[in-house]
Image (cartoon, grey):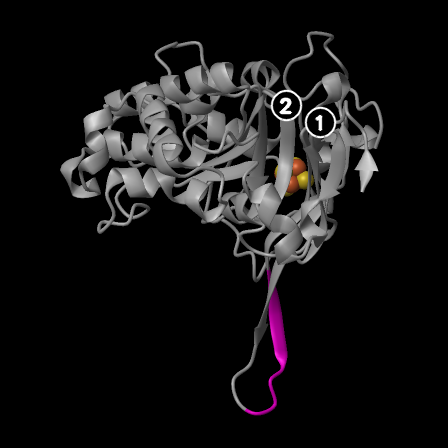
Amino acid sequence: MTTIPDAPLLQVRNLCKHYPIYSKGFMRRLIRVVKACDQINFDLPAGQTLGLVGESGSGKTTTGRAILRAITPTSGQVLFNDQGRLVDIARLSTSQLKPLRTRMQMIFQDPFASLNPRMTVRNIVAEPLIIHKMAHGSELDDRVVEILRKVGLKPEHRTRYPHAFSGGQRQRIGIARALIMRPALVVADEAVSALDVSVQAQVINLLADLQQEFGLTYLFIAHDLSVVRHICDSVAVMYAGRIVELAQVDQFFEAPQHPYSRALLSAVPNPDPDMPMRINLLGDVADPGNLPAGCSFHPRCVECMDVCRKTCPVVHRLSNNRTVACHLYEPENMPVSTGDGKGINMLPESQ
Ligand code: SF4
């Protein structure tokens, strides 16, 4: 355990979650390995929001769950800054992990499935405090009322059951449950995807307000880039279990560098007639258990080169500390810089 007070709240280093698939029968043979998330690297400073985006099946949820140790990573480090002590969550035993659980919470996608229909709102929201023996009696009730008010619910809602609430209200109950222990890190897994657009806006604004008030750090898993632009400080794009681009949110939306990022962004509806045409991706997302040789995006990439079919690209660090994993950023493939910092005309700082 290292003491580094100024370290980012979360440092993820080469995080992998692989699932071996064996043949049936007595002689179980390893057939293949599904790389649900592979070689994930990023820093998340305290008080900031990192958006993890990509199509379904790209490994976003697995990454979030591995970071919280809801599943055990295959390898890699998840360094959590616990009030100045750097703790590797990936290596802790269950008993060592328990006190840290109060500092890391998750908001789930489906507000209908994530709440126990047989429990009252009071019991749902109070349960984490009871499990961790952090409050009881009138103090417990006071904290439930306080957090319900913070998320825009009323104290009288305590006695009701989840079925009595709308989707947006249920998500508020889920947020209250996640925040009642005042966590430092919250993983929001598609927290607004199941909600109507108008309710989405309310919940996103609520999350932003709560971040300001409690100094929360969010890992925001989403596939809606408009939402990500609104709430996030930086963006990591995942494809087939890997991060293919990582950038500050303004840089990303101004000039996405990876061909997959450009395709994702071109699919966002935009009334501006000068915006580039939509890039139609061919085929489906790569199967993480049967990845194509070379760059896993190459069968769908409109800028595919010969090298892409044979060699997996390394991660290149561009200017402004952004990273991209693509052969286009190798010196021999770099076009002449136009000096405007846009498109792919950015020189790598290091490789
Ligand atoms: Fe496309 Fe090649 Fe870059 Fe992969 S490495 S994204 S195939 S250009």
| The quarter of the displayed image where residue 140 is located | top left
Outermost residue to the bottom: 26
User: Which quadrant of the figure contains the N terminus?
Assistant: top right
Residue 221 — which label? none
Outermost residue to the front: 137
In which quadrant of this rendering is ligand 1 seen? Answer: top right
- Position above or below: 292 against 6: below
- Position above or below: 171 against 71: above
Q: Secondary structure at mark 2?
A: loop
Indicate the position of residue 315 as horizontal and vertical percent values: 75, 37
**Depth check, front residue: 88 or 125:** 125
| The quarter of the displayed image where residue 6 is located | top right
In three-dimensional space, the C-alpha distance between marks 2 and 1, rounded to whole angstroms, equals 6 Å
Q: Which residues are magenta?
A: 26-34
Residue 46 — which label? 2
User: Which quadrant of the figure contains the C terminus?
Assistant: top right
**Depth check, front residue: 258 or 230:** 230
Indicate the position of residue 313 as horizontal and vertical percent values: 73, 42
Left or right of 98 on screen, residue 135:
left
Q: Is residue 29 magenta?
A: yes
Circles 2 and 1: CB distance less than 8 Å? yes
